[in-house]
Amino acid sequence: MKSCRSFAPLLEPFSDGELGPEKMLEVEQHLLECRLCVERVRFGEAMRRSLRRRVRETAPVSDAFRARVVEAVAAAREREWEHLRAARAERRSWLSFRTIVPMAAAAALTLVWAASAGGPERREQRRATSYAQVDPVRVDDLLEELVEHHVRGRSDFTELSLLPEAEREVGVPVRVPSLKNFGAQWEGASVVPVLNQRAASLRYRLGNHRVTVYVYDPSRVPIEKRLEQRLVGSEPVYVGVRRGHSIWPPEHRGGGEGLATGLTAAGNAEPGATIFW
């Protein structure tokens, strides 16, 4: 058992809460057994309270000093917010158009929106209404969920004859794209939850990369709202990045919209504009 002399230097930092957990336990255990050290701790606390009270009485805080403290705290808070905003902007920043790669070279994820019913005028009207109503945060959440499902990689079935059952769950027609021209091999499909709806997940293998095609209702969450529009020939392509995956959904002849996301490297977005539904 240690003597009171060995604990004496620890009593003041103990009262100030400056000791580590192990030392705090040692001092507390000693105080249970030593009335002398308990009185020392109480005396030290009484002295500090008296000193603080005396200082407040003899040196009151001026309005100017109080104002400087308030300004310093506000400035520190603003710097913290600026740091958080910069970090958030960096996470949401999109890759430049020159960094989007051809699907045949490095695609890792493809997200495709099924064609919606109605003619071009009706689709444009519904898209404009949806763009105005959808919260950008929900669009970001949808992108995060789709990327997360792609990373996890799961196929519930491989038979194409089971796709009609997936259509009933998704609520839109599910047409399987042929990616043989890109060297992609079919692996299977599943139905995954995304926000308040479901999407069909069609999985392929392209070399060492996985390719996932998601099919769901495009009118509910306009993903292009969070991307930057570019033109590849006469086709508009929306490009961006999410967690290291490049994203580009082209407009589609005959209706429907697509979103392609893949690993990034030097290249162009021409293959993204070849996806039509």
Image: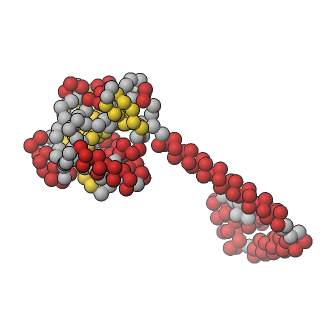
Residue 115 visible within the image: yes
Quarter of the image with the N terminus is bottom right
Q: Residue at x 30, y 35 (%)?
A: 250
Residue at the spot 43% in from the left edge and 26% down from the top edge: 98
- Give the residue at the far left of this rendering: 161
- The picture quadrant where one finds residue 179 is top left
Horizontal and vertical percent position of residue 66: 79, 64
Question: Viewer-proximal residue, 208 or 260?
Answer: 260
Q: Give me the residue at 64% from left, 59% from top.
A: 22
> Looking at this view, is 208 or 46 the one in front?
208
Rendered view: 107 above or below 120:
above
The image shows a total of numbered marks equal to 0
Kindly identify the residue that appears in the image at 78 percent across and 59 percent down.
68
Q: Position of residue 75 (x, y in %)?
A: 70, 54
Apparent side of residue 108 relative to residue 11 in the rendered image (left or right): left
* Image colouring: secondary structure
In the rendered view, tell whether residue 233 sits above or below residue 93. above
Residue 268 as seen in the image, left or right of residue 171: right
**Residue 247 locus on image (x, y percent):** 36, 36
Is residue 54 visible to the viewer in this orientation of the structure? no
Image height check: is 80 above or below 61?
Answer: above
Q: Is 231 located above or below residue 193 in the figure?
A: above
The outermost residue toward the front is: 121
User: Left or right: where does residue 88 sit relative to residue 206?
Assistant: right
Q: Quadrant of the C terminus?
A: top left
Q: Position of residue 127 (x, y in %)?
A: 31, 49
